[in-house]
Image (cartoon, rainbow, N blue to C red):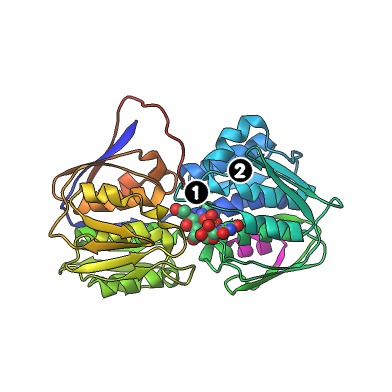
Amino acid sequence: MEKYVIHGGKPLHGEVEISGAKNAAVAIIPAALMVHGVCRLENLPEISDTDTLLRILTYLGAKVNMINRSTVELDCTHVQMDLIPDQMWDMTRRIRASYYLIGAMLGRFGRARTTMPGGCNFGIRPIDQHIKGLTALGADVTLSGGFICANARDGHLHGRTIYLDKVSVGATINIMIAAVTAEGRTVIENVAREPHIVDLANFLNSMGADVRGAGTDVIKIRGVKQLHGGSYALIPDQIEAGTYMAAVAAAGGSIRVSNIIPKHLEGISSKLQEMNVEVEEGDDYVLVRRDGPLHNANIKTKPYPGFPTDMQPQMTAVLCCAPGVSVVTEAVWSSGRFKYVAELNKMGAHIEVEDQSAFIQGVDSLTGATVRACDLRAGAAMVIAGLAAQGVTQIEDVLYIERGYQDIVGKFRALGADIRCIDEPEEPARGWNAG
Ligand code: EPU
């Protein structure tokens, strides 16, 4: 079993280049199932979630040609399968984004069957809004025995107006993918506005779809007969960028975070500035510096453009050493997303969780300890805490971290961190927790 060993307490210096956005990639790869022809994807992150999805598509009959580490050519023209075969169930159960295969298969074949998705285990993760949307488009959707089955009632989907009762990234994406070839016009109201929603719309449009309004709360889609091949470069990962920004806030130092879209980071940048961290924006980079004491701050997560829930654990790790009391409130997920707090407390943090909020009493410094990555972003928070802590931190279950962060150890080492990955004898698998 791999684990990270960090000798903390060293400020970070240098430049880190951000990879393509995980949550855009895990939507765009399944959406490529809708494309007839060769679809070239650039700036793909090299993480295990994208690898898993590419393996699933290959199994379904897609030609997958890796051009280099971040570019792939996908040809799904001859894919015939409208159900995920049992050999793939282990993979579809590992990741959240496997449910986008439902939207894509339903849109393309009028039929789909796969397992219920996996994903970060931070409470109940309902999919009622996905079902509501796909049902409105004319599908019968059933959940039974851990599987999702969807069948278009008359063989194909029909555009409709759908109002989402809850702002959901996943439901917005699934319905968008299914609707691009539905007959007529689909209007989805109260949709998520995350940058990866816009990225998916841009990808679909560059392959011949007619999707408008992504980035606002209403998306309008005029169905087209089929999508054609093309080339598309994914946006950079706003959460990966935010994680390095948070790391320099916690450990001190001065870094340049490059290959980013600063606009996507505004919520994170302004919160860090409030915490006495300097953030200077360039065209496609930010300079982040912290050499004075941190200031305490309150954070409440919200759908984009609010403060991202996927940065909540990392910011809590930073606030552990801000004098005074900080309150971090989770308003997207349940308090299950605070499981990692117990791990931070092992490092000398003083955090109490009550209902949806973590109350953080700042301490002078954290102390290295053996902790585990409870899930992807919780794992990133442990890395940040370890970099800031005095002494040695060992992080277990790092597989979860590597599902969403490309070469996190190499990137932090290049910033001067003393972090390495060591391999220890295998223990029985505990299940998967990402995205
Ligand atoms: N919800 C419902 N019904 C639904 C769908 C969602 O009630 O049908 C609720 C959820 O329970 C939650 C809220 O709506 O309280 C938001 O859920 P959403 O559907 O937006 O989340 P998701 O699509 O399952 C994606 C990301 C998560 C990220 C959330 C919120 C992927 C693969 N995952 O999940 O990313 O936290 O959006 O921004 O895109 C991560 O990257 O670490 C991660 C967990």
Answer with mark 2 or mark 1, whichever residue precedes in sequence: 1
Of helix, strand and loop, which mostly describes the magenta segment? helix
> Is residue 122 left or right of 81 when viewed as pictured?
left
Q: In the depicted view, which residue is nearer to us: 164 or 241?
A: 164
Q: Tell me what residue is drawn at x 27 percent, y 58 percent.
A: 352
Visible residue check, residue 431: yes
Query: What count of labels does the image hold?
Result: 2
Q: Taking 107 as reference, is 362 left or right? A: left
Q: Which of the labelled discs sits on residue 116, or is there none?
A: 2
* Residue 330 higher or lower than 278, as above or below: above
Q: Position of residue 220 (x, y in %)?
A: 70, 71
| Crowding near the residue tagged with mark 1, few <14, some 14–19, many ≥20 C-alpha atoms within 10 Å | some
Q: Is residue 245 visible?
A: no
Residue range (magenta): 199-210
Q: Answer with left or right where residue 433 lies relative to residue 179.
A: left
Relative to 26, is 283 above or below? Answer: below
Mark 2 nearby-residue class (10 Å; few <14, some 14–19, many ≥20): many
- 205 in the magenta segment: yes
Element under disc 1: loop
| Amino acid type, callout 1 | Ser
What residue is at 39 percent from the left and 71 percent from the top?
267
Name the residue at the top extreme. Answer: 425
- The residue positioned 36% from the left and 26% from the top of the image is 427
